[in-house]
Image (tube, rainbow, N blue to C red):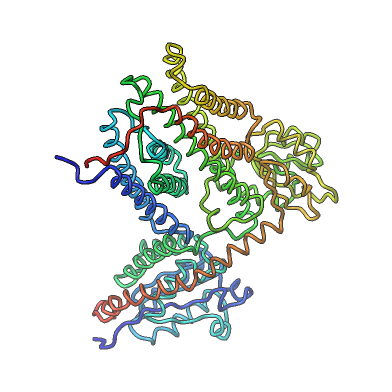
Amino acid sequence: MATHPAILFQLGASHHTAPLAVRERLAIDAARASDLATRLGQIAGLNEFALVNTCNRVELYGVVSTSDAFPALHAALGAVTGCTPAELDSAVTLRQNHAAIGHLFAVASGLDSQIVGETEILGQVKQAYDAALAQHWTGPVLNRVFQKTFQAAKHIRTNTGIGAGQISIATVAVDLAGRIFGELAQTKILVVGAGDIGLKTVQAFQSRGATAITVASRTLAKAEEAAALAGGWALSLADLPVAIAEADIIASSTSSPDFILTRELIAAGIKRRPARPLFLIDLALPRDVDPATAELANVFLYNLDDLAEIAEENLAQREAEVAKCQAILADRTAALWPQVAHSLNAPHAS
Amino acid sequence: MAPLLTDRALLWLGALLYLAGFLVGLIGLTRRHSPAGLRTMLNILLIGGWSFQWLGLYQRGLVGRGCPLGNTFEIVQFVAWSAMLVYFFVGSTFRVSLLGLFTAGYAATLALVSLLIPQWDLVRGQKLFGNNPWIEAHAALAVFSYGVFGLLTLTSLMQLLQNWSLKNKRLNGLFWFLPSVVQLEQINYRLVLLGVTLLSISLSVGAAWWVRNIESVHLPKLMVTVGVWLAYLTVLLLRWRGRLVSVRFAWVCLILFGLALLSLGPVNSNRHGYQPVTLTPR
């Protein structure tokens, strides 16, 4: 019978430890994840494990009876990813016990993400845990640690400003539209120009419920092509005056050297719907929207620089919250660790 | 059982609870993610303040045997009370963030100022409504409509702030919590409609009795009252036709309410038979 306690560990690589080229090789698809799980299941002394596998990180959480199992874990990772031992040594980090819990808390709360405070990671960690639970890879230690992780991440999201404010151009624009229109489901969006950035912005609006999309381009064929992608209607630039009067949000991204949306054009458009505000998003360089349109009542104009500045401000505010979040998570880690340590000392863990 | 607190003590309690609500709301503003219980605490304080204010006004009403609108103090208290009542409906229907804070500040200011100016409450008119419930209803509805216009002033102020914030790209701090432009537009439209409707009913009732005794109302009061009603009716019609919207609408509402408050002087000057105010219970 083992007399030493089992070890809770985290072994893996992320954007903090590995360059993109190495992360590409470490990336594990479904087939390779299954292969890795099979190999892990054969390692003696590995009692529990769960694999968190996202575009920016491959991390294995588990419980081993002794540290003798770690070389086998490295070997399994190397065999599945094709990375050399030297590459793994430089990219992969190992955290144990208290540090492993703290790291998982930080990951799930978005503190360790490339975009600090992003929320997608929590869903990915939950998926990883659900998959491990379904396969009976987890046990009492990991079950407790993951449940406490979800509680900690929820607490951070609710009680700090780590997720406040959008930090990409498209989502900042959507956030601003929410301040102008509230619900976006009923808003009518006009995209001028069939460029990639305009369509990405439309996707961001669609993710918030917007459905009425119209694409206007110099040639109708291009507009129809882009409209098909966006799931909207197409029209040519000649129909712009009528479309402006109908639209609530106009995102423009043409390559025109001159203003497409002049003050006169916008003024004429809003005259037909004076009570409804108009949100102009100028995503083009050189600019598509005459800056003088911002002087019109009920018209709100934001260009690329404005959106980028807001994104940077939001990011700075998120980063200012990091220290507060770390202090909260440190307290929670310290509170959880004695319980986990007790479980690791129990006979079933080793 | 005789009440333990005088009407003024109850009104003081109400005003202080409004002030406490305002301060709690301000604490929430210092962080983007205020604790979930803060909004509940704000609402509890406002309901508490409103209840105490209601009890204070009720005691005064018992003494005057009618709606407590006997002097400037009571009218200002009633305007604050009405604004808070309208907020409870508007706030719960539209879930407008920050409106509770603004209403708390507004009601606390009105209530505290009226309590801190003793001259407003030295005497009060007696037999204001001549034991006529219709005249009493006319007066109460008119002052209640001022409460609605007061709330409209707050939402107009919020609209100006939101507009400034979006135009100047200053989106953090207080501006972070402001409701959307469209939501404020909708609320403003409904509030001006409600206020004009109440004032119209009030004036219709008043007019029905006025034609029986034309000398009962002094000309300045008549002109000012009809002037305020016409001004708000014009604003409503222009808004309905889309001629007065957004920032211009908000500015007009702000200025108009200032003028409407000033009009309370001439309206109140029609009173006669003033008696010194005594606290109830003594």
Instruction: Look at the image and tell me whether residue A39 can be seen.
Output: no
Residue nearest the viewer, comparing B62 with A261: B62
Where, quadrant-wise, is the C terminus of chain A in this rendering?
bottom left
Q: Position of residue B41 (x, y in %)?
A: 34, 53
Most distant residue in the left direction: B1
Most distant residue in the right direction: A257
Residue nearest the viewer, comparing A120 with B246: B246
Most distant residue in the top direction: B212
The answer to which image quadrant residue A225 occupies is: top right
Please give left or right for residue B75 compared with residue B263 in the image. Answer: left
Residue nearest the viewer, comparing B58 with A236: B58
Residue at figure coordinates x 44%, y 49% from the top left: B105
Where, quadrant-wise, is the N terminus of chain A in this rendering?
bottom left
The correct choice, above or below, for B28 with respect to B90 in the image is below
- How many labels, in total? 0
Residue at figure coordinates x 41%, y 15% from the top left: B209
Q: Position of residue B142 (x, y in %)?
A: 44, 28
The answer to which image quadrant residue B91 occupies is: top left
The correct choice, above or below, for A193 with respect to B253 in the image is below
The correct choice, above or below, for A165 with respect to A93 in the image is above
The correct choice, above or below, for B275 with respect to A301 in the image is above
Q: Position of residue B22 (x, y in %)?
A: 42, 52
Please give left or right for residue B18 compared with residue A339 in the image. Answer: right
Q: Position of residue A100 (x, y in %)?
A: 41, 77
Residue nearest the viewer, comparing B16 with B209: B209
Instruction: Look at the image and tell me whether residue A9 can be seen.
Output: yes
Please give left or right for residue A144 compared with residue A266 in the image. Answer: left
